[in-house]
Every structure is written in structure tokens, then in C-alpha cells.
Amino acid sequence: MNLPLATRLPVEPGATGRRRPERGNRIAGGMLPSRRIRVLRLIGPAFVAAVAFVDPGNFATNITAGADYGYLLLWAVLAASMMATLVQYLSAKLGAATGGSLAAVCRDNTTTPVRIGLWLMAEGVVIMTDLAEFVGGAVALHLLFGISPLSGGLIIAVTTMLILQLRLRGRDAFPVVVIALLFAVTVAFSYLMFRAPFDSGAAASGLLPRFDGGQSALLACGIVGATVMPHAIFLHSSLVSGLKGRAVALRTPAMLTFLRCRPCTRH
């Protein structure tokens, strides 16, 4: 006999109705994974969402800022990264707490005109993002191997479709491939960072927010826009919500504030 989840979790002595699962309990016909395993299962979606931080838009804006203004806009890079980290954390928290993606939560808690507006915004973001990735990939292949931009774009398109097939066939291989590609980018940038000269004094002064004309202010806006990416916010919540059933008991009292604040009626 399969008992409901609420009846199968023991209540600790002195607790006031709060049930906490113990290691080794059976939930939905399986053993409850340890906390370490449950946390490790969240790392895959986190790395997949982290790709948004190393896309061609980030490369273009940050490299341009360094080439034109040195360390002047380092504060903008740091502020954008901190802002994106907070937003991605909230996105993952929403997916773990509600079991649904940000798109699904918006659909269930907004009126029809708002839903249509959000959908159109998402479609526009997807088009603009894909355009930057394909053009950036084609330019990279041309610079590295002399491949024509048209052929490079086709190669990027085919490679993207193959990687997405891993996502459609299962959730295990897709994060592994993405993490491997992200690791390759990390190694390349680490190598360049140690080869390039570093001025600690200029870097420290770059943490002071300031501009050098209107062009630097415009470039700072580009840095923020290239780092806080809407598609990554939607993606992170979707990947975490897809772990439901495999990474059980992830909810905490803080996460459940999402459920308490969530309206119960649909518009």
C-alpha cells in the first residue's frame, strides 16, 4: 500500500506539525537521496544557465570595454555579475519551490493580456539572442579556421541541433556536454588571463563607479544587458523544476514563501 507523502514522513519530538524527511525514507517508491546528492543534482542546471555569462554578447561588450577604457568599467562587470547571480538564484528557488518554470508561474498568475505580452517579449528575446549566438559563432570559426561566415553559421546551426537532441532524449547527457564546453572556455580564459599583464592598482580603481563620456555609459548598459539575460532566467527555473521526482525534499521554509504568496485562482 502506497501511503501519501505526508503520512510517511516521521515527525520529530517537540515539532509542531513540521515533518522532516530522514535519510533512507522511501518516497514515491524510492529511497530519499542524501542532502549532498540533492544539492549536486542542482549543479547541472546551474552550469547550463551559466552559459549565458560566457556568450558572444558578454565577450563583445567586456572586451570592448577593456580595449577602449582599460579597467574603467570593471565595476559595471562586477555589478552586472552580482545582479545576475541574485536573479538566477531567485529563478532556481522558484523552480524548486513551486515545481514549475517561471513561464508556467507567469501563465497561472497573470491575466491574458499580460501573458500575451510576456510571450511576445520572450519570443523577441529568443530571436535576438539566437542571432547574436549564430553570428558570434560564425565569426569565431572564421577567425580561428578561415571558414566562411555562411558555412560557419551552418556548422553552428547543426551543432546546436545536435546538442538540443541530447536535451530532448534525456536530462543526463545534456548538462554533461554543456559543462564540458563551459570548462573549455574557462581553461582558455584562464590561460589568457595569466598571460596578459595585470595592474592591480588600476583594477582597484576600476571598482569605483564612474564614466568617461557618454560612450562609456552606453557600453556599461550593454554590459548589464549582456549579463542579465531573460532567456537564462526562464531556462534556470525550467531546468530545476524538471528535477521533480528525482531530487525530492528540496523545499525549505524559505522556499515555501513562494507557495504562500502564490494566488490560488487563475484569471
Image (cartoon, rainbow, N blue to C red):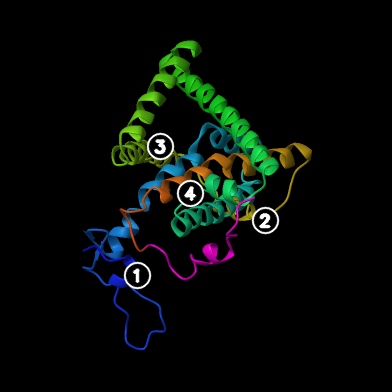
Q: Main secondary structure of the magenta part?
A: loop
Is 252 magenta? The answer is yes
Mark 2 against mark 3, which lies toward the viewer?
3
Q: Residue furthest front?
A: 1
In three-dimensional space, the C-alpha distance between marks 2 and 3, rounded to whole angstroms, equals: 28 Å
Residue 208: mark: 2
Mark 3 against mark 1, which lies toward the viewer?
1
In three-dimensional space, the C-alpha distance between marks 3 and 1, rounded to whole angstroms, equals: 45 Å
At label 1, the amino acid type is: Ala
Residue at 47% x, 17% y is 153
Q: Position of residue 88 (x, y in %)?
A: 52, 51
Q: Nearer the viewer, residue 130 or 25?
A: 25
Q: Would residue 173 appear left or right of 61 to someone viewing this image?
A: left
Is disc 2 surrounded by few (<14), some (14 to 19) or many (20+) residues within 10 Å? Answer: few
Circle nearer the N terminus (2, 1): 1
Residue 225: mark: none
Circle nearer the N terminus (4, 1): 1
**What residue would you read off at disc 4?**
237
